[in-house]
Image (tube, rainbow, N blue to C red):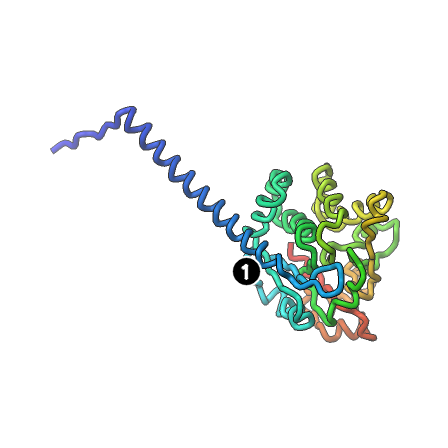
Amino acid sequence: MSKTPIRLSKTGVVASVVGSLALVSLAFNVWLFTISSTGAKLVSQLSDAPTGSQPIPRIIHQSWKTHDIPKDRFGNWDETWKLQNPEYKYILWDDSENEALIRNHYPWFLNQYLSYDRGINRADAVRVFYMHKFGGVYVDLDIAAYKPLDNLLLDHHLVLAKMEVPGEHSWEHKHEIPNAWMASRPGHSFWMHCAHLMMSTNSEGTEEKTGPVMIWNALKTFNTSAAVKTDPIHVAGPESIYPYSWSFEKTDDAVHRVCSKQRKSFDETKCRHLVDPDNRAYAISYWSHTW
């Protein structure tokens, strides 16, 4: 018996297409609602963060693709921040929450944010907005805490930290102010200066677009502006956060063998003995360079 082919009328085809588009639209709106709701929940959690007696709120921000931090890469270093700073509110942001923050509170930056084809650029960019919106302390996952932060932050409105580099004529020179650790009061004008610089740069390099070179350039121009008088910036010495500098890898391999998380010979205890023998560091970055 031959089968009669099924023929759809033009009306049926249109109805089918419209129905499919409606389902796609519904799914997209549900996704947006989920992102917005998640972002709103985090904003609510941070609104009552403790401030203590200092301008910089007691909040620690970290970020990963999901809420499952890969312990094989980062050990339990996230826990060291909670242990050393029990009065601080701890927030781990994931990719969807990061996008929600930009979408809900900085929509003028959203197209720029979504235009980045590398996740590291979005991760770099969004930490600028953590600082502007909420303030607190941003910390990369490969940094371990060894002391409470309050004394480092006391009386300051924005704190960055310096890393030793070979010299001002080396290519590493513009990496001397990493964006791996940053602390700020909310609303500091430096962060909008960074945001506008990210939007105006034509550079193709990751570090230049959103990373440490962008921070270095922003700091250089901000320090010549009138804003620095009302919004000062404190730059802590290398001994505070970055006693281990990745930039000397070619000239000091004995240190890098035990201090770089990229090396199989990494040894946290030996590294601390070499780079921080007097226990002056509040934290140490072990530079996993996961991106």
- In the picture shown, does residue 234 fall above or below 9? below
Q: Is residue 262 visible?
A: no
The residue at the point 57 percent across, 63 percent down is 69
Amino acid of disc 1: His
Dot 1 falls on a residue whose secondary structure is loop
Residue identifier under label 1: 67
Q: Is 96 or 249 nearer to us in this picture?
A: 96
Give the quarter of the image for residue 286: bottom right
247 vs 94, left or right, is right
- In the picture shown, does residue 209 fall above or below 142? above
The residue at the point 70 percent across, 68 percent down is 144
Q: Quadrant of the C terminus?
A: bottom right
Q: Can you give x and y, in whole percent of width and height, for residue 46 in the image?
A: 61, 58
- In the picture shown, does residue 57 fall above or below 168? below
Q: Is 116 or 205 nearer to us in this picture?
A: 116
Q: Can you give x and y, in whole percent of width and height, for residue 192 in the image?
A: 73, 44
Q: Is residue 172 visible?
A: yes
25 vs 137, left or right, is left
Give the quarter of the image for residue 227: top right
Most distant residue in the top direction? 10
Q: Can you give x and y, in whole percent of width and height, for residue 25 in the image?
A: 42, 38
Q: Can you give x and y, in whole percent of width and height, for residue 114 in the image?
A: 59, 41
Number of numbered callouts drawn? 1
Q: Residues within 10 Å of mark 1 (few under 14, many from 20)?
A: few
Q: Quadrant of the N terminus?
A: top left
